[in-house]
């Protein structure tokens, strides 16, 4: 009977989901945009029609086009948390989605390379504005018992966006015009516009944010609107805004994303909290801060985003000569990323941080060493030999190992080792190192 009751309750939730689930779904859809950008930019810049429009790009210019989004993402992420604290989470999400839509629309309509890069920079502002806010909002509106899985939905949607982005490009690569590279970007703009509109219409203010602003009656009404029971509202936090803020900041540091997110508004917090923020540089917190920054930088230096951004080029160099086939191979790697992220999130506590770091590092190092040695010894040829197939298989092994170990474990561990007094600041520094290193890799 209990099993039947649980099934019945689950079915009722699916038929009539509580408002907080609908809101989390909208927020996760906005997170999908970050993955779409990562999944499309590599294939788009590898298309022949892209070269026809803008001319052949040097390796340096190609890297600038791909990585330009990261500069403005890093900048906006530093202030996204402060903006969100001032005007509210939904408004910040709407602003971020609108900026992304404008940037993607400029990219899709570009007639010069400078215009294309400008569009990517504007889209980066949108990404950075939302990076910290998406997970914070989900944490603040969801019941404590469901907070972890719902917060992880943003990470899953980012991985799904990477996968979908590759296959959109796979479907458009044979269009005999510039529409082949414009269409994936136009779809990004359309999805971002829908996300902004849905956020503006259906996302209520966070009840925790309202309580922090002293609007407790309104916060209580929003809890009712969201469908969160009184037992799950943690009334003690609503009665104590200072404890509320402390918990919200800590929740904001839970692992949620891709690799390039800044979880809090570092500069604003540094101004407001003085000694609490600068204690990260004191004797007690300095070593943990350095280790956290080192780990987050090494996460990108592993080469994962290089693989994601340039997957079609890597597979083409390894012997998959046609653009269509290389995009398909890239899509397979994106499927592996999405699928392997699920057990990594669910089992991260069971596997343990140290074990996953060690075995993941061994496999990642061995994979990169094998690929590098094959290229260094001139053993990889596009039309013959086993070297090219070894490279292709090893890329897949690398992606699996990274996503099941360092992708999730590093973010958790780098946050957990920090003293409570300086955890937010140290986590922001680590995420900044992650984004800056990502720019260098790209």
Image (tube, rainbow, N blue to C red):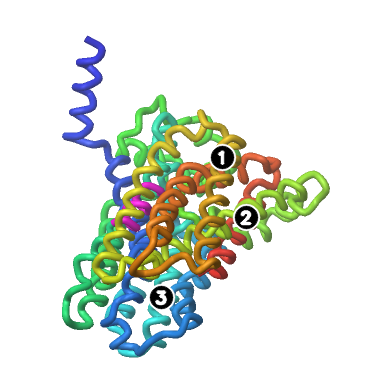
Residue at x 62%, y 49% (from the top left corner): 424
Residue at x 35%, y 63% (from the top left corner): 39
Query: Looking at the image, do the residues carrying marks 1 and 3 touch, with CB atoms under 8 Å apart?
Result: no
**Element at label 2:** helix
Query: Looking at the image, do the residues carrying marks 1 and 2 touch, with CB atoms under 8 Å apart?
Result: no
Residue at x 67%, y 40% (from the top left corner): 417
Q: Distance between the Cα atoms at labels 1 and 3?
A: 36 Å
Pointer 2 residue: 430
Residue at x 70%, y 44% (from the top left corner): 421
Pointer 1 residue: 359
**Element at label 3:** helix
Q: Earlier in the sequence, mark 1 or mark 2?
A: 1
Mark 2 is surrounded, within 10 Å at the Cα level, by few (under 14), some (14 to 19) or many (20 or more) other residues, namely: many
Tell me residue 131's x, y (percent): 46, 57
Mark 1 is surrounded, within 10 Å at the Cα level, by few (under 14), some (14 to 19) or many (20 or more) other residues, namely: some
> The magenta stretch spans which residues?
155-163
| Vertical relation: 372 (above or below) 109 | above
Tell me residue 294's x, y (percent): 67, 54
| Vertical relation: 114 (above or below) 280 | below
Give the number of the mark in front: 1 or 2. 1
Q: Nearer the viewer, residue 85 or 386?
A: 386
Mark 3 is surrounded, within 10 Å at the Cα level, by few (under 14), some (14 to 19) or many (20 or more) other residues, namely: many
**Element at label 1:** helix
Q: Quadrant of residue 433?
A: bottom right
Tell me residue 173's x, y (percent): 22, 72
Quarter occupied by the N terminus: top left
Pointer 3 residue: 120
Tell me residue 51's x, y (percent): 32, 85
Q: Nearer the viewer, residue 247 or 115?
A: 115
| Vertical relation: 62 (above or below) 226 | below
């Amino acid at each position: 009977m209990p099993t039947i009751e649980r099934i019945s309750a689950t079915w009722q939730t699916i038929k009539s989901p509580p408002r907080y689930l609908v809101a989390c779904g909208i927020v996760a859809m906005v997170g999908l945009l970050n993955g779409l950008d990562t999944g499309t930019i590599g294939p788009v810049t590898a298309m022949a029609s892209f070269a026809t429009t803008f001319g052949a790009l040097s390796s340096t210019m190609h890297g600038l086009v791909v990585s330009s989004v990261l500069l403005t993402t890093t900048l906006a992420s530093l202030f996204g948390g402060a903006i969100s604290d001032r005007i509210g989470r939904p408004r910040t999400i709407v602003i971020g989605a609108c900026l992304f839509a404008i940037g993607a629309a400029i990219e899709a309509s570009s007639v010069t390379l400078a215009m294309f890069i400008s569009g990517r920079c504007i889209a980066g502002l949108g990404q950075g504005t939302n990076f910290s806010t998406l997970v914070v909002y989900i944490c603040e509106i969801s019941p404590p018992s469901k907070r972890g899985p719902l917060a992880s939905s943003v990470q899953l949607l980012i991985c799904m966006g990477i996968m979908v982005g590759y296959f959109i490009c796979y479907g458009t690569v044979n269009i005999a015009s510039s529409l082949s590279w414009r269409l994936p970007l136009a779809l990004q703009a359309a999805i971002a516009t829908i996300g902004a509109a849905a956020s503006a219409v259906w996302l209520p203010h966070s009840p925790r944010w309202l309580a922090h602003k002293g609007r407790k009656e309104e916060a209580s009404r929003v809890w009712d609107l969201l469908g969160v029971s009184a037992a799950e509202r943690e009334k003690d936090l609503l009665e104590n805004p200072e404890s509320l803020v402390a918990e919200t900041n800590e929740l904001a540091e839970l692992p949620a994303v891709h690799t390039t997110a800044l979880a809090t508004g570092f500069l604003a917090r540094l101004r407001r909290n003085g000694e609490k923020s600068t204690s990260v540089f004191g004797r007690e917190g300095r070593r943990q801060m350095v280790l956290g920054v080192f780990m987050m930088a090494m996460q990108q230096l592993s080469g994962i985003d290089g693989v994601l951004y340039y997957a079609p080029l890597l597979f083409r160099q390894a012997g998959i000569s046609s653009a269509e086939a290389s995009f398909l191979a890239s899509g397979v790697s994106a499927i592996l990323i999405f699928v392997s992220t699920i057990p990594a999130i669910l089992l991260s506590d069971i596997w343990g941080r140290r074990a996953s770091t060690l075995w993941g590092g061994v496999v990642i190092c061995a994979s990169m060493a094998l690929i590098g040695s094959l290229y260094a010894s001139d053993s990889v040829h596009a039309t013959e030999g086993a070297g090219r197939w070894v490279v292709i298989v090893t890329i897949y092994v690398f992606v699996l190992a990274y996503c099941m170990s360092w992708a999730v474990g590093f973010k958790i561990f780098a946050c957990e080792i920090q003293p409570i007094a300086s955890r937010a600041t140290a986590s922001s520094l680590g995420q900044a190192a992650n984004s800056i290193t990502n720019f260098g890799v790209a």
